[in-house]
Amino acid sequence: MLSATAPVVQPLTPPEGSKINFGATITGIDIENLTDADFNIIREVLFTHQVIIFKNQSHVTPRAQFNLTNLFNPAATSYGHGKTVIGNGFVEEYEGLKNIQLRHPHHKTFHVTTIPEEDDLTHTRFYRWHIDAALYGLAPPIVTTLLAVKVPGGRRQICRYDDGTGDELSVPLGTTAFVSSYTSYDILSPSDQEFARTTKVEYAPHPYIWMSGAKSRPDGLGMVSEGKEIPLEDLPLIEEDKIQILPMCWKNPLTGKLALQVHPSAIRKLHLADGTVVEDLKEVREMVRRLQRPGIGPGYVYAHDWEEGDFVLFHNRGVLHSVVGAFGGRR
Ligand SMILES: [Fe+2]
């Protein structure tokens, strides 16, 4: 199918009071029938704006979705999340998966404190700020895609940080939240930028199993240090060469800008420029949190208001994202 109109790129307009400087919509491209020229446009827009929203893509097949992802991640056959259907409620059939009960991850099972029952409909939390990545044996994929099959629509909730700052943000129900890791880097002091540029992060082996005994901070940015991580000797066999030691800052392949790109809940050690290895987990987490927390401030969060057919492609090495909230039984 030939597109009748040339692709149009429209950077997102930040809501009143917002400082977001990333994200764009593209119209006039059909993900299902992608040309080389389309891909070249998408690539440039992606590395410029980090998050791309394609409207009206309900017809896109998992194969086309995979193909687009694969154009960016040619070596990848396995992704951070594997094949996942994200959502909440009961869906009769989706691409051959029948009668699946979708479970939207809920902060109640993951956060150290929770929103009280009486506020549950009106208030919510960031579930977990993260990069889509196994962080053990595999490099993080360059892009991730999300397609909204059905959306709750309608009302909004207040997303509370509950981290002692009083920060909160009005968000659409069932939103996915993004922050730019370029901004996170840009707003650091020059000495913190220097620290970030020269420090490497060592992630835990089998990080998701390792962290499974522990609880998240209430703002979803990293874990609470209570010594509840699964001891290394109780994890599956650890192959040392699969442990990921990655720079704190990742360079944008198009703009050369640096992103402060750390998966905060999976970190275990820091390797400093002078060769020191910081091994105290509480200290490691506090050092990283001090750098990352400003970048998830309410003014820097893009909370996507999902509409049916929205196809979102994001730069997984340039943004952090989080599922937000959970839906009640009725929406
Ligand atoms: Fe994710």
Image: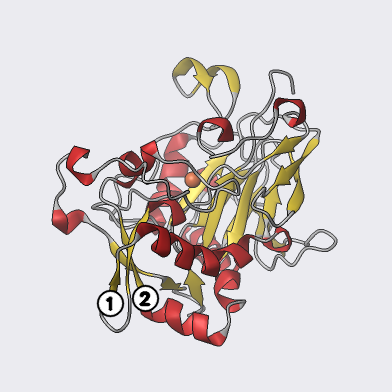
Name the residue that disc number 2 marks.
Answer: 199
Q: Are marks 1 and 2 in contact (CB under 8 Å)?
A: no
The quadrant of the picture occupied by the C terminus is top right
Q: Is residue 312 visible?
A: yes
Q: Residue at x 57, y 42 (%)?
A: 127
The image position of residue 91, as x and y in percent, is 57, 18
- In the image, is 126 to the left or to the right of 40? right
Q: Quadrant of residue 196?
A: bottom left
Circle 1 Cα neighbour tier, 10 Å, few/some/many (<14 / 14–19 / ≥20):
few
Q: Secondary structure at mark 1?
A: loop
Q: Nearer the observer, disc 1 or disc 2? A: 1
Q: Residue at x 27, y 77 (%)?
A: 276
Q: Quadrant of residue 294?
A: bottom right
Name the residue that disc number 1 marks.
Answer: 276
Rendered image: mark on residue 291: none
Real-space CA distance between mark 1 and mark 2, rounded to the nearest whole angstrom: 10 Å
Image height of 208 relative to 280, above or below: above
Q: Secondary structure at mark 2?
A: loop
Front position in the image: 294 or 58: 294
Q: Residue at x 42, y 38 (%)?
A: 63
Image height of 221 relative to 269, above or below: above
Front position in the image: 226 or 244: 226
What is the three-letter code of the residue carrying label 1? Thr
Spot the residue most to the right. Answer: 16
Q: Quadrant of residue 12?
A: bottom right
The image position of residue 21, as x and y in percent, is 69, 68
The image position of residue 123, as x and y in percent, is 74, 37
The disc, 1 or 2, on the residue closer to the chain's N-terminal end is 2
What is the three-letter code of the residue carrying label 2? Thr
Circle 2 Cα neighbour tier, 10 Å, few/some/many (<14 / 14–19 / ≥20):
many
